[in-house]
Amino acid sequence: MACRAWTPAQRFVLRCFVLLWFLSVALWVTALHQSLGPLQATIASAAVQIARVAGSQASASNDLIRAGTLLIEINHECTGVFVLFIFAAFVLAYPARPRWRLVGLIAGVALLSLVNVVRLAMLVRLAELWPSSFEYFHEYVWQGIFLGMTVFAALYWARSSD
């Protein structure tokens, strides 16, 4: 039985998963996730400032947000770094011109980072208004929305690059 050549779609998926694996290994080897404290504090502060526009009384101290009766810790997972890795692997694996990849990375990371801070701001406000629903919205609703927006951003970029 002859071995058939891989389709462009199969090569793209393989490149995407290999890149995602390399990014994950790089994160682990460099312990990058352990040095995101300043970013976590910046995200906490930005989320509180946005939440205050919606009437929040929350406050931030380093990577901690006090929202009503809840104390929310912005840890390395809250930075969106893992979702950004998925987006970056997609963009870098996609068969596009290098300049367009760079544009996609810069615009996508900026957009998704903003979406992440808005997500956290909405969760802060939710924690004040309905603290019992915070965990559900944090773990399920916003995780799904954020991942869906990441897929949409990647597909929109890919379509624009063709």
Image (spheres, rainbow, N blue to C red):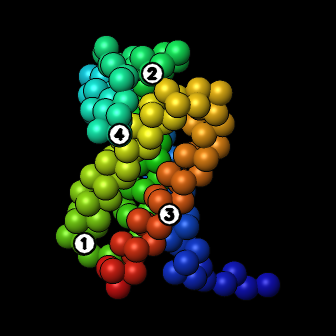
Earlier in the chain: of badge 1 and badge 2, it is 2
Tell me the SS state at disc 2. Answer: strand
Earlier in the chain: of badge 4 and badge 3, it is 4
Residue at 36% x, 23% y is 57
Report, in whole angstroms, how far the alpha carbon at label 1 lies from the one at label 2: 41 Å
Image x and y of residue 12, in percent? 50, 71
Do tag 4 and tag 3 residues touch (Cβ < 8 Å)? no
Report, in whole angstroms, how far the alpha carbon at label 2 lies from the one at label 4: 13 Å
Which residue, given by chain and number where applicable, does mark 4 sit on?
54
Instruction: Please name which of the two marks, 3 or 2, marks the residue nearer to the observer.
Output: 2
Earlier in the chain: of badge 2 and badge 4, it is 4
Quadrant hosting residue 80? top left
Which residue, given by chain and number where applicable, does mark 2 sit on?
67
Which residue, given by chain and number where applicable, does mark 1 sit on?
100
Image x and y of residue 87, in percent? 42, 56
Work out whether residue 82 can be spotted. yes
Which residue, given by chain and number where applicable, does mark 3 sit on?
151
Instruction: Please name which of the two marks, 1 or 2, marks the residue nearer to the observer.
Output: 2
Label 4 packing within 10 angstroms: few (<14), some (14-19), many (20+): few
Instruction: Please name which of the two marks, 2 or 4, marks the residue nearer to the observer.
Output: 4
Q: Quarter holding the N terminus? A: bottom right
Earlier in the chain: of badge 1 and badge 3, it is 1
Earlier in the chain: of badge 4 and badge 1, it is 4
Work out whether residue 98 can be spotted. no
Front residue of this view, candidates 144 and 23: 144
Image x and y of residue 14, in percent? 55, 64
Residue at 22% x, 65% y is 103
Q: Amino acid at mark 3?
A: Val
